[in-house]
């Protein structure tokens, strides 16, 4: 549980078993990304499973943040207001997909001793790896853009701060990350978990006020053929599924698992893979609860009152008070949105550092890297809000999700390829059933995203 500061030295870098290292990768050892926190969290070598698991809890929650970003809020609000509880089954299915792909990230980070960016650099020629790097940077910028807008909307709803000013204020979270990391990586994890707890508490109160039909909620998790028969419902289902996996989460998770000092032996790594997978599974189940809560709240308030076209965050905020009869509900909604935006921007900046260091083996000051990432995202948000007004932020949010959809195959396909290769993973290669399952999931997500992009282009 204790965090310890560790100065990294190249000889400390982990690698897979010797056979896999020499056959599958160009370099036997790599200098890890996030070297300042590499292996800095002590793990328990003995004791109960719970005691061992406690040291691994954390990275999964940073990853789970990406599954409840402002873009996901919009699709859940639209689905719940339009079709009630029926699309809860889609939220459950998308969560299962996320659990499988994030488990592969854990396997790659621990078993191969590389994050996904490093694995791409050490496997592909430059003419392939450099475009993949550019793709990842575009995806992170689009992700950060969505989080910046979500945070600015939260500030606007709570404190009536103009969006263009709120967008600029979001740059301050860069210094928050640096301040927390100075005390140890556990402090960043603790902050994110605390924000998640606030989000959960806010939705718990709102759902209690909404008093949903719990029988309908349970039936909503059951598969139904109505989704396929109703074209409009199918489109919203595709939106929920298509926005499930974000490219930056795959890079982020494969790097964050290496903050644990789990050891070098095969047995220690196998146990680390198991414990880190449990961590991400628990965290993603928590993300499912949050996403389902958004949909349930929309169904119990907007759908039941005939407001079936609610999709904008500001629109949902303004409707809550008259429908629930409480001034607390919209305030809690805005607080949850602000916490969600803060969490997402923190994880996006960490992903940006992993991608740059992993692909380019380039190390610059963390504050400079994070400030650069944030400025790239803030600039278009400020320009659009000043030039076109507040309504344009919604269009910018949609555009960021389309950009993410375009980048997704360039992260998912290499991940499945690497973890399926025995020459690269050695004894930690993914079982064939898991690879087959992940390949189907990747194909489905990519196909759905492609359809969403096509529909967007086609108007």
Image (cartoon, helix red, strand yellow):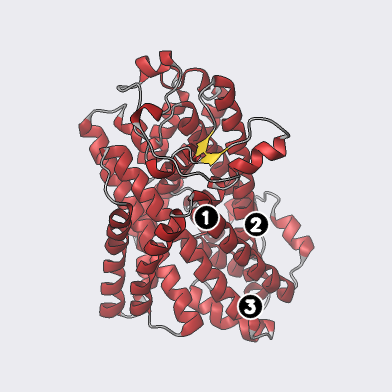
Q: Quadrant of the N terminus?
A: top right
Eye-nearest disc, 2 or 1 = 1
Which residue is rendered at x = 69% and y = 86% of the image?
Answer: 325
190 displayed left or right of 344? right
Q: Contact (CB < 8 A) between labels 1 and 3?
A: no
Name the residue nearer the viewer: 127 or 74: 127
Image vertical order of residue 268 relative to residue 76, above or below: above
Q: Position of residue 84 (x, y in %)?
A: 65, 66
Tell me which residue sits at (56%, 56%) in the image. 190
Q: Secondary structure at mark 3?
A: loop
Q: Between residue 427 and residue 297, name the one nearer to us.
A: 427
| Tag 2–tag 1 contact (CB < 8 Å) | no
Are the residues at dot 2 and dot 3 in contact (C-beta closer than 8 Å)? no
Q: Which residue has dot 1 on it?
A: 187
Residue that mark 3 sits on: 306
Cα distance between the residues tagged 2 and 3: 25 Å
Q: Name the side, left or right, on which 7 lies relative to 310.
A: left
Which of 326/179 is in front?
Answer: 179
Q: Is residue 453 visible?
A: no
Spatial distance from mark 1 to mark 3, Cα to Cα? 44 Å
Residue farthest toward the top in the current orientation of the protein: 19
């Amino acid at each position: 549980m204790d965090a310890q500061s560790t100065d990294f030295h190249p000889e400390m870098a982990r690698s897979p078993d010797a056979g896999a290292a020499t056959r599958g990768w160009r370099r036997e050892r790599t200098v890890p990304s996030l070297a300042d926190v590499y292996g800095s969290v002590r793990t328990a070598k003995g004791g109960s499973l719970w005691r061992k698991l406690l040291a691994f809890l954390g990275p999964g929650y940073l990853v789970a943040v990406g599954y409840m970003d402002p873009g996901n809020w919009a699709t859940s609000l639209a689905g719940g207001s339009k079709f009630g509880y029926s699309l809860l089954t889609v939220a459950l299915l998308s969560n299962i997909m996320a659990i499988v792909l994030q488990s592969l990230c854990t396997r790659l980070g621990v078993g191969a001793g590389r994050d996904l960016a490093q694995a791409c650099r050490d496997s592909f020629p430059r003419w392939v790896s450099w475009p993949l790097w550019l793709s990842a940077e575009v995806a992170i910028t689009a992700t950060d853009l969505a989080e910046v807008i979500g945070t600015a909307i939260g500030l606007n709803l709570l404190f009536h701060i103009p969006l263009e000013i709120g967008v600029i204020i979001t740059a301050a979270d860069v210094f928050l990350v640096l301040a927390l990391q100075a005390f140890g990586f556990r402090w960043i994890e603790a902050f994110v978990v605390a924000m998640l707890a606030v989000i959960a508490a806010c939705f718990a109160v709102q759902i209690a006020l909404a008093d949903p039909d719990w029988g309908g909620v349970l039936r909503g998790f059951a598969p139904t053929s109505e989704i396929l028969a109703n074209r409009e419902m199918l489109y919203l289902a595709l939106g929920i599924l298509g926005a499930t996996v974000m490219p930056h989460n795959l890079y982020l998770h494969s790097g964050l698992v290496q903050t644990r000092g789990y050891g070098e032996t095969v047995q220690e790594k196998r146990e680390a893979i198991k414990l880190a997978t449990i961590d991400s599974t628990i965290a993603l189940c928590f993300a499912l609860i949050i996403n389902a809560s958004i949909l349930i709240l929309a169904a119990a308030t907007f759908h039941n009152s005939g407001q079936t076209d609610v999709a904008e965050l500001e629109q949902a905020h303004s409707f809550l008070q008259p429908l629930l009869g409480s001034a607390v509900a919209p305030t809690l909604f805005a607080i949850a949105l602000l916490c969600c935006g803060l969490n997402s921007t923190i994880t996006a900046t960490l992903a940006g550092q992993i991608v740059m260091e992993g692909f380019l083996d380039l190390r610059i000051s963390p504050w400079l890297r994070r400030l650069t990432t944030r400025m790239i995202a803030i600039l278009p948000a400020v320009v659009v809000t000043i030039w076109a007004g507040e309504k344009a932020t919604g269009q910018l949010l949609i555009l960021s999700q389309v950009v993410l959809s375009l980048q997704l195959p360039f992260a998912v396909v290499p991940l499945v390829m690497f973890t399926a290769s025995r020459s690269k993973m050695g004894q930690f290669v993914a079982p064939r059933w898991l690879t087959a399952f992940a390949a189907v999931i990747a194909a489905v997500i990519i196909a759905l995203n492609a359809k969403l992009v096509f529909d967007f282009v086609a108007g």
